[in-house]
Image (cartoon, coloured by chain):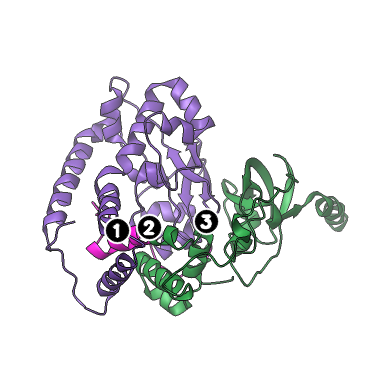
Amino acid sequence: MNGVHDMGGMDGFGPVVHEDDEPVFHAEWEGRVYALVGSALRAIDVNVDEFRHAIERIAPAQYLASSYYERWLSALETLLVERGATGMRARDAVASRAETPRRARFTPGDRVRARNLNPAGHTRMPRYVRGKSGVIRRDWGVFVFPDSNAHHAGTRPQHVYCVEFAARELWGKPANIRERLFIDLCDEYLEPADKLRKTAKPKARNRTR
Amino acid sequence: MSDDHHNAAPTGPAARVKALEALLTDKGLVKSEALDRIVDTFEHKVGPRNGARVVAKAWTDPEYRKRLLKNATAAVGELGIAGPEGGHLVAIENTPRVHNLVVCTLCSCYPWPVLGLPPVWYKSFAYRSRAVSDPRGVLRDFGLKLPDGVEIRVWDSSAEMRYLVLPERPRGTERMNENELALLVTRDSMVGVAKVSAPDGRARDAAKSERKASTKKRASTKG
């Protein structure tokens, strides 16, 4: 979902403030929330993607007004209510069914484009890479697909790749040529980019002549 | 955590957590003692000292460095370090020409087994938003000015890989052993927002970690 949690590239939050000698938890309840989330989610069979999505579903104004552990707490409350707070188990068995992983479509060195996907549900492809072209740097192997797993719609196992993007590709000309971004993206988030590149280049040359 | 640590508003998060814990304990879904153990582990046992041991070993043992860069999960496992959010660790090496910086723009993914739980700045909207689009500006917020010729690589932890920066070993530390070196390595240097201080800063760093220890003691006794 195109939520406020998808912050990469936003402006206006001011400088990063560093707290010296910071404690692990700033209040006792933070530690309790941290421990509760880990234990309770396991007990009621909530997967990590579902938990992340519960955080993303917090209304934008509330999300921005809450601290990190307050968001964890709100997400846990939401999930408990949704599961009925008692006798809770996962809603279906699809997520745990063994599924055959998809074949790797890309290998390191391949040029790819992040697809312009805007799913209403959970996704781990941030907005700032969508539609942008990059290069596959690593194939990390097969992982569960967060977009479906978060909704108990199957694990859709597939390869996850480390994709490199030039800062200029992401942020335009003023960006420093000595800055690159590396991000791990699922196979389904990507499409081959070579074809369009080849047709785009000669056109640009014609214009300059 | 001490028993005398109370929180103010009864409707605030402290009260909500208390109610939830009571409910879930009552249903037999969680056990308070198990929660105590988790809190204790992350407050006292898991933290950036783990990562510092890994870095110091990589600085002093070239074969270990190779193994770390090839498969960080296995390499930190050699030191007995493992745990949640540590199943797919990746070590990325800083050099005089390349500086790495780690962020999670979508939430705040962080390599817990080697660095502990993330600090507030790592989870802040300011860091999550700007680390990808203005990394040099973010580094300046931390007082780190890199020469223009240095390439910055930003790693957005959007999947299950968790990144640990292997900082540069500072010059002048050639005679220090692994344990002494580990004391120099800071959390911030392993996320990529700082460099490890040169040896003339050694005294300052030691004082800092001492201060840290005493603050921790204070924090655990104050209400």
Labels 1 & 2 near each other (Cβ < 8 A): yes
Chain letter for mark 2, please: A
**Front position in the image: A208 or B92:** B92
Q: How far apart are marks 3 and 2 (CA)?
A: 33 Å
Circle number at residue B31: 1
- Give above or below for B45 relative to A188: above
Chain letter for mark 3, please: B
Circle number at residue B129: none
- Same chain shared by disc 1 and disc 2: no
Q: Nearer the viewer, mark 3 or mark 1?
A: 1
**Front position in the image: B170 or B160:** B160
Chain letter for mark 1, please: B
Q: Name the residue under label 2.
A: A39
Labels 3 & 1 near each other (Cβ < 8 A): no
Residue sitting at x 26%, y 34%:
B183
Dot 3 amino acid type: Val
- Same chain shared by disc 3 and disc 2: no
What range of the chain is rendered magenta? A9-38
Dot 1 amino acid type: Lys
Chain B, hue in figure? purple
